[in-house]
Amino acid sequence: MNLSIELNKDRNHNLHLFAGKLEDDKPDKESENTLVIQGGMERLNSFGNEVVKKLASMPKGRTLYIEPGIHYIRESTMKLPSDTNVYLAGGCIIIGAFVCSGVENVRIYGRGIVYQADFQRYGGTNGIRLSNAWNIFIRGLTVWADVAHPLNIGTHGDYENNGDIIENIQFEDIDILEHNEYQAGYLGCMAINVGDKNTARNIRYKDIRIEPIKHGKLLDIQVKCNTDYNPAPGKRIENIQFEEIRYTGSGEVTSEIKGFNPEYIVNEVGLHNILINGKKVNSLKDANIEVGEFAYNIAID
């Protein structure tokens, strides 16, 4: 069980308690294909591009094992190579962000924390950013995005060429706390907003638990072109599945699913066993979801 405890309704200085079963999938620190970042609570540890270079020189299936302690990514973000596992041990705090761009077969797991209280330093980077990525499995997170987006895919890409392909992504066993987003056009708690000629496909959200939303949408699936961010519109969103989604709230902004034009569309979105305040919803209306133009084969059961 993961808890966020707020005293006197102070949501910006809450206490996080993480209590769950003992881990049964910790990697072997002694393996020749494991790179260990040593920890320690008595000092601030730092690492950067030298770790990325070392990982790239190791065989596929390598593991980055980060021990308990406070760790600072010197370059603010770390771009992970393909075929890499990142294990965040309990008690590990990462000050920075992981980037999965142009990669495949990446796994990030463990009981550690990705910490970004100093939001301005990261220029809008979320804790885990996916672009031009495929075969990514993200599981077991508690997300509290006070001034960003909990799960957001597709806004930026390689617009000067043919855009990015983001595919075969799975989010599973995730808690989202107090979504509170006011940026028009990007209100989705679970959002796929493709721009810059990007395509997003084969993405699955499973066993996602969402606490009451202060402001925002439950989900937002759109092919779009925001002139503030995108020199070109996105291309396509297809085969998006939401399974076992549990939301305990009301009054959120209506979710949207829509394409951009007859060519740049949304196709095949499935919603399965969606529970709102403990009750299964069987229609898009009851789920407060609106389907707009150029969106096809949207189903709820």
Image: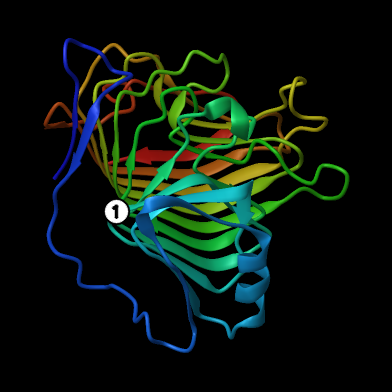
Residue at left offset 41%, top offset 87%: 31
The percent coordinates of residue 89 (x first, y second) are 32, 61
Q: Quadrant of residue 194?
A: top right
Q: Residue furthest right?
A: 160
Give the camera-side residue of 59 and 224: 59
Residue 126 in sight from this viewpoint: yes
The residue closer to the viewer here, 224 or 8, is 8
Mark 1: amino acid: Gly
Q: Is residue 294 visible to us here?
A: no
The answer to whether residue 156 is left or right of residue 232 is: left
Q: Is residue 182 above or below residue 198?
A: above
| 38, 181: nearer the viewer | 38
Q: Secondary structure at mark 1?
A: loop
Foreground of the two, 198 or 18? 18
Callout 1: 10 Å neighbours few (<14), some, many (20+)? some
Q: Which quadrant is home to the N terminus?
A: top left
Residue depicted at 14% across the width and 49% down the height: 19
Residue 213 in percent (x, y) is at 31, 20
Q: Position of residue 54 (x, y in %)?
A: 63, 75
* Residue for point 28% across, 17% down: 11
Residue 129 in the image: above or below residue 8: below
Residue 286 occupies quadrant: top left
State how the image is colored.
rainbow
Say which residue appears at 51% left-offset and 66% top-offset: 106
Measured as percent of width and height from the top left, residue 62 is found at: 51, 79
**How many marks overall?**
1
| Residue that badge 1 annotates | 91
